[in-house]
Structures are given as structure tokens and as C-alpha cells.
Image (spheres, rainbow, N blue to C red):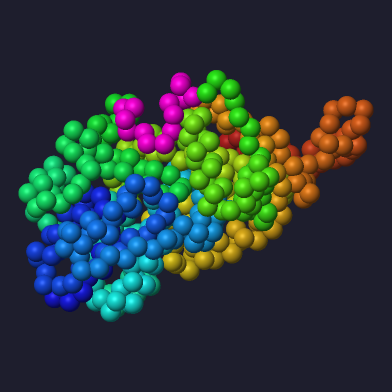
Amino acid sequence: MPKKIVVAYSGGLDTSVMVKWLNNKFDAEIITATGNLGQRAELEGLEEKALKTGAVKSVIKDLRYEFVTEYLWKALKAGALYEGEYPMATAIGRPLLAKMLVDIANDEGADFVAHGCTGKGNDQVRFEVGVQTLAPHLGIIAPLREWEFKSREDEIDYAIENNIPIKISKKNPYSIDENLWGIAIECGVLEDPTVAPPADAYQITTDPKYAPEQSEQLTITFEAGIPVALNNTITDPIQIVEELNKIGGKHGIGRLDLIENRVVGIKSREVYEAPAATILHKAHHEIEKLVIDKETFRFKQGVSDKIANLIYDGLWFTPLFKALMAFVDSTQQNVTGEVVIELYKGNLSIVSRNSIYSLYSKELATYTDEDKFDHKASEGFMKIYGLPYKTMTQIYSQTDVKETA
């Protein structure tokens, strides 16, 4: 039996009910652990709520700077978009929260940690694989895989019966996970992929139809693949992301409505808002196209997909992730420059991009009289380049004739 349990605590429905449920089931001290990754209202009154619900201690850590510089920037440099679209705000945050759980458990002398993930969700994998990798001595409890509640409505009833303060209701049953990189909205009518997300599902983005009639341009500066300035004024990494969320949200940037493949093999419908992530991935990709050679750029696309899969599947703290990131870092040495990007009613347009490491040569690319490209050299190139396929066709044609005869 556990003597002391550190609970990953967001203050949402599942973890609020979980603290009370663990209190009733185990004769153990409950310590809640919360990481500030940039979520907004969830942190208000969180310590008081945890203690009122049955915890003996509440630990809240500001992880925003570490989250941006050690986690978000790595995913951005990698170009990690799950299944080509999702910037993975939740998935990138989980390994840092798992690390926080382990640190607090070690500091408090706890023998177990607990999380509020479901048995068919992705986060159970991310938390548990992270904890097992970082601290194999710790036990793990997952109440949602074993408790008696069959639905979120059952949890709401339990919360009401036990005077647990919650902001959710049966009329507004969305499950919302938020951090600096984006917001994930689930449950309720969103579980029906034939129904468009209701207006009240979105938290930080304007409907593009009602976004400003005037477009807005932003200048994003990169050094070695990392955003270092916004509009040549904002340089703090947290503020860069926050301001891009604010500006992008105003213009309806970053709304995603996806069918995605979960780790456990089922498909799910997910709705996301990620203005800053959408803008930065677009801008970063443009600088990469300008400065990275063709073969490295092509190869990195496959690496980007693999890293995205590793992050999504909860395999951040693995040798393969570390090795692939070493490759990514080597590709980012010259990813330095500026991108001017225009926002208008949910759309992103590249206005300009420049870099001291640009491989673009106007003299080679132009079709004017400034053209320096040696067109005569292409004749020999074409003969050599197409030779394998010309030879193949000739041989196959001769073989077909013999077989017909």
C-alpha cells in the first residue's frame, strides 16, 4: 500500500475527483503537483482547492521558461507536426510534467505517483513511460483505469455529492487542456466527427469570418533554428509565444479540426487552437527552405515525421529521440534569418524571407539577361540523368519482343 502519493494535478474534473477518490481508497498522504506551462485560469485558487479536496500539500512549479526553451524549441527545430498537422501542445508538455512528478516524488520521499489519464488516451503512455524511464523505482496509480465511474457525468455527480468545486457542467462538458503551445478541446458534441465544432468550443481564436478586415504583418527572427525576436522588439521566449498567440488568435490563425490516430490504435476527433505554434512552424520552415541544401532538407522531412511520432507516442526520454535531435541540431546551425509573415482571416502568407546563409542565387534562378546559369551544361546532365531509365526501357523492349516471338 502506498504511504505517500504525488498526484499530477490540473484542477480539472478528472484530477479534482481523483484526489478525493484516492483519499477514500488509500490510507496515504496525497501531495498534488502542478506545472505551470502557460495555462490561464486553471491556476487560480488551485492550491486552496487541492487542500480542500483532501491533499496535505500542493506544489506548483513555474515551468514556462524550461517548457519553451528545452521542449517547444526542440520540437520546432525538428519540424515535428504529428501526421503533418498537429503541433502537439499536450504531447510536448507531458514529458516535462512527468519529470516534475519524479522530482517532487523524490523530494517528498513518495513511493507512488498518480495521474488522471484514461485507459484509452495518449497521456497515460506519456506519463507512465516517462516516469518508468526516469524513476523505475516509483509505483504508478491510474485511477481512471480502475474506478467505478463510467462517464464524465458520473464524475460530475460525485463531485457535486462531495462538494468538490468544478467549473465543468453537464451542459458544457468540454475537456480542455491548455499550455503556451496550444489548447486541446475534447468531449461533448466534438465526439461526433460529422458535427462542426460549436462556437463556444474555441477559447482563444476568433472565427476567421469575424477576424479583422485589415491584415497584419509580423517579423520573426531566428538564430540557429530558434526564434529570438518578434517584430525586432520582443526577445523573451515566453513573451514571443504569448504575443503570437494573442495576435494570431485575433486573426483566427491556428484552428485545427483533426481525425488522428491515438497511441492505443483507435481514431479520435480532436479540436485544437495553436496560433503561435502554427505561425512559428510556418516561418521556421521557410528559413529552412532558404538555407538547407536539397538532400539534407529532403532527409530531414522523414526525421521530422519520426520525431513527431516519438513525441506523440510518449518516447521523449529515449536514445532514439536523443540521437535524432543531434541530427536536427546539426541541420540548424545556419537556420538564421528573418521571415515577414502576413495574417489575414485564418490564413498565413509569406511576405519575405532572408538570411546571411541563403543558398538562393538570383543570378542562377533568373530568366532575365542577368542569367548566369550554364544552359549548355544541361545537355550532358540530361543524358547522364536519364540514362538508367533509357537503358531500362531499351532492354525491357527487346525482352518483350523475344518473348512474343
Where residue 267 appears, as percent x and y from the top left, is 31, 42
Q: What span is colored magenta in the figure? A: 198-211
Where residue 27 appears, as percent x and y from the top left, is 11, 72
Q: Residue at x 49, y 24 (%)?
A: 211
Where residue 324 appears, as percent x and y from the top left, is 55, 61
Q: Nearer the viewer, residue 341 or 303?
A: 341
**Horizontal arrangement in the rendering, residue 96 relative to residue 8 (left or right):** right
Q: Residue at x 28, y 65 (%)?
A: 58
**Quarter of the image containing the C terminus?**
top right
Where residue 200 appears, as percent x and y from the top left, is 31, 30
State the image quarter where residue 182 is shown: top left
In the rendered image, the vertical position of residue 162 relative to residue 85, given as above or below: below
**Horizontal arrangement in the rendering, residue 114 relative to residue 362 (left or right):** left
Asked if the stretch drawn in magenta spans residue 323, the answer is no
In the rendered image, the vertical position of residue 5 relative to residue 201, given as above or below: below
Res. 19 visible in picture: no
Res. 110 visible in picture: yes
